[in-house]
Image: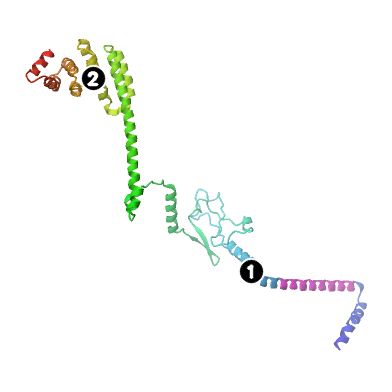
Amino acid sequence: MMSSLCSSAPLLLLLLLSTQSPTSVIAFSANTMKTSFVAKASLHTMKMSDRMSEFDHILGEGTASSSSSSSYAQRRQSLLRVPDTSSAVSSSTRNEKKVTMVSSMGMSASPLDLDQDDDVYDLDAEDMSTDYTTTTEGGVSTAVEPSSFSDSRLNQYMEQKTSPRKFQIPSMKEYIKGKDFSVILVTVMIPSFLVYLATKKVFTVASSKVDEKSDFLLDSYAAEMVYHDGNFDEMKACHSDYKTKLAYLGPVRNDAMIKRFLELYAKKKIVSPQAISSMSYVFSIYKLSEEKAAKTLVDVCLSMPEKIASAGKLLFIGSRMLKTNEAKKALDPIKTMLSSSYRDDVSGPSIVDMAQQ
């Protein structure tokens, strides 16, 4: 019976349409075609959806995009616009800067995240450095202060980077601890001895070179001073020149220069009023007091006990050049040295006194 009804349906439809107007027939046909097209499209979409679901289930996909979109939506909900009256906003730049900040709980940035310019915070760039961080818990944004533990470790790291490194010599006690004697002998004792010998050799060679140079300059100074004896201007210029050349001798420079001059002067010159005048001028160049001048004469004479004639000349010039009794008394060691040079059967002090008159 159902088959007979289905076969007679077209006839009934034609009979029904024949009784209607042409406009109604055209409208009915259009609605029928539209309904059929929508039904076919829906059926095709459902089939494609079922196929995609099967493939996604097999490949394990289909959840990443949904989780990404849901996390993105959650991250967008965690954005916070801080009011101008907030303490996190600087009073001088509240309405001047807008800085974008995302929640620390959000996912890593995707290409879609880089194009979102509408999610901004009204925060000052200076206040968002390390003052606050935002976290999302159930869609509610909260402010969290930075950890003091992290700050302390960061400060310690920065101090190590910025502070200058100090060179520390390793302790010898720690180095030789637990080592065999042969190892210590090869690595410590022998190298140390070789370094000592090399250092001593270098020091000896350098010292001998310096001594040779000093002796040459001192002899040249004494010779030029004796050559210009009586010409005080030339003697002063010569003294200034060699004083500069012998500056490396340091505190002993003046003492070495005047003693070398006195030795050569007593050897080359005879006793005369000119000699006394020149000697007085030389002591004035060195700005020596009478006590220091007497001590210098004594030191020079005692350093050459075999040169009795030179010592006698210096004693004679010194006794006439010095004015105070204390300074003249300080020359007695020279008289004693000269007296001891004579035989026992001869009165040495008497001969010395007679020679100095």
How many other residues sit within 10 Å of disc 1, few (<14), some (14-19) or many (≥20)? few
Q: Which residues are magenta?
A: 23-51
Residue found 42% across the figure and 55% down from its top? 152
From the viewer's perspective, is residue 266 above or below residue 203?
A: above
Towards the viewer: 249 or 11:
249
Residue 352 lies left or right of residue 143; in this view the side is left
Q: Are marks 1 and 2 in contact (CB under 8 Å)?
A: no
Residue 287 pos. (x, y %): 24, 21
- Three-letter residue code for mark 1: Thr
Residue 317 position by quadrant: top left
Does the magenta portion include 34? yes
Towards the viewer: 269 or 184:
184
Q: Main secondary structure of the magenta part?
A: helix
From the viewer's perspective, is residue 226 above or below residue 52?
A: above
Residue found 25% across the figure and 21% down from its top? 260
- Three-letter residue code for mark 2: Glu
Quadrant for the N terminus, please: bottom right
Residue 166 pos. (x, y %): 38, 46
SS at mark 2? helix
Q: Residue furthest bottom?
A: 1
From the viewer's perspective, is residue 187 above or below residue 116?
A: above
Residue position marked by numbered label 2 in the rendering:
263
Residue position marked by numbered label 1 in the rendering:
63
